Image (cartoon, grey):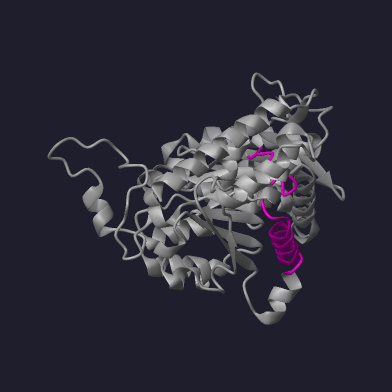
Amino acid sequence: MMMMGDMMGTFGSSMASLFFFWATFQQIFPDHLKMEIKEFLLSAIQQLSFVQRFSDRIINFFSPYVVINFPEYEEYRFNHAFAAINTYLGAKSTDKAQRLRASQVKESKGLVLKRDETKVRDIYQGVNVWWEIVTDNEGDRTHRLTFHRRGLDIVTGSYIKYVMEEGKSIEAKNKKMKLFTNNPSLNWDSSKKSLWRHIDFEHPASFQTLAMDPKKKEEVLNDLEAFRNGKEYYKKIGKAWKRGYLLYGPPGTGKSTMIAAMANHLNYSIYDLELTAIQSNSELRKLLTATSSKSIIVIEDIDCSVDLTGKRRKKYGDFSSKKDGEQGHEDQNQSSRVTLSGLLNFIDGIWSACGQERIIVFTTNHMEKLEPALIRRGRMDMHIELSYCSFEAFKVLAKNYLDIDSHPLFGEIESFLKETKIAPADVAEKLMSKNHKIDVDGSLKDLVESLERRKEGSERSQ
């Protein structure tokens, strides 16, 4: 009995000493140093195998800190909270930062400096918080927010909302448009982040320099403006805030340039969707949910990407080389493919409403090959024909390339354009300066000769 009493006394004394040490530790050390010591001790404890099973309970019992994680990806969908936090932390004052990241915007003389630290301390309404970016073994990143439990109401009630709003505001001011393209779905399993890859979008096209009929150009611009300002209207009529455009016409008539001009006008990023890299309708839905709002989703040459009977065509060949006798991926493509119904659901089905302020653009050189159900009004809301070069389009090109509004050869060129089919891209090639020197007379004479040859060739073929 005496021995039991001695043991209890020793245990009680040890616990009292432990609690005294913990109270002293809490009072003396500053918060940031306490976190460092706590992490070191907990890391050392967790190295003991018999403790690992109980480490979470021990940590939760002794630690007064709360942790909230913000992963970069949830399933296959990008977590926009992660991006807002990243922007907010990167824009914080750099004068006290020990590590910085420098970048230079194209054609800018100065450098943009941002914090490049894995741990950042912040103070909000008297509450200290610590942000840490953690990367797991698979390369997935997470922003981890740590704070004392007594600040729980402030952090969850207003601080996180403040960080989100500030991050989005900074992002809007410094927004760079992106050009995305989808990776082949065979690579998706390796990383969630591999659905789309992107580069900065820096195409200079604008509606001012676009060579097309002025009335048609104005009609497209008015439609884009109505869409951009139509949030309440779409909500009122009960439709998803999206719009479809079908661009059709011969090669070289400016379909891709039109898309670039639309993106620059609206300040939207572009998702260039390559259907031949997708194996099934479900993969198409995954790609759709991984796109952001305020974007243009483009499927170029849709008649060459997928056969409307469901049989896949290969636009850029197979994903890997195939030797004689090998099946490669062809059989896989035959058994798993994007279908017409999958595309229709992508355009205006339930899944198409998973984001807001999106534009879907199809391009084709052969409109007659497309299934009417795919391009009917309501799916492709506006059909825009980009045809051969007219005289009005030529005058835009002459202004762009030669900086002229009139010339004695304009009359002759106008007559030829009424009788000859030539793509704006071919006209632009004739007007482009040679050796960076503008030769107005020489360029226009080259164009006249080219138009004359085309006319003669057309007459002989008849």
* Residue nearer the viewer, 69 or 150: 69
Residue 214 lies within the magenta run: yes
Query: Percent position (x, y) of residue 130?
Result: 72, 41
Residue 241 lies within the magenta run: no
- Compared across the picture, whether 123 is left or right of 251 comes to right
Q: For residue 161, which quarter of the picture? A: bottom right
- Compared across the picture, whether 208 is left or right of 289 comes to right
Query: Percent position (x, y) of residue 190?
Result: 40, 42
* Residue nearer the viewer, 12 or 56: 56
Total marks in image: 0
* Magenta span of residues: 201-230
Q: Residue furthest right?
A: 125
Asked whether the viewer can see residue 199, the reply is no
Query: Percent position (x, y) of residue 159?
Result: 79, 54
* Residue nearer the viewer, 140 or 182: 182
Q: For residue 233, which quarter of the picture? A: bottom right
- Is 361 placed above or below 136 here? below
- Is 244 placed above or below 179 here? below
* Residue nearer the viewer, 436 or 315: 436
- Compared across the picture, whether 377 is left or right of 405 comes to left
Q: Residue furthest bottom?
A: 237
Q: Residue furthest left?
A: 325
- Is 100 placed above or below 164 here? above
Asked whether the viewer can see residue 227, the reply is yes
Query: Percent position (x, y) of residue 22?
Result: 70, 41
Report the residue at 75% width, 35% height from top.
32
Report the residue at 29% width, 58% height from top.
336
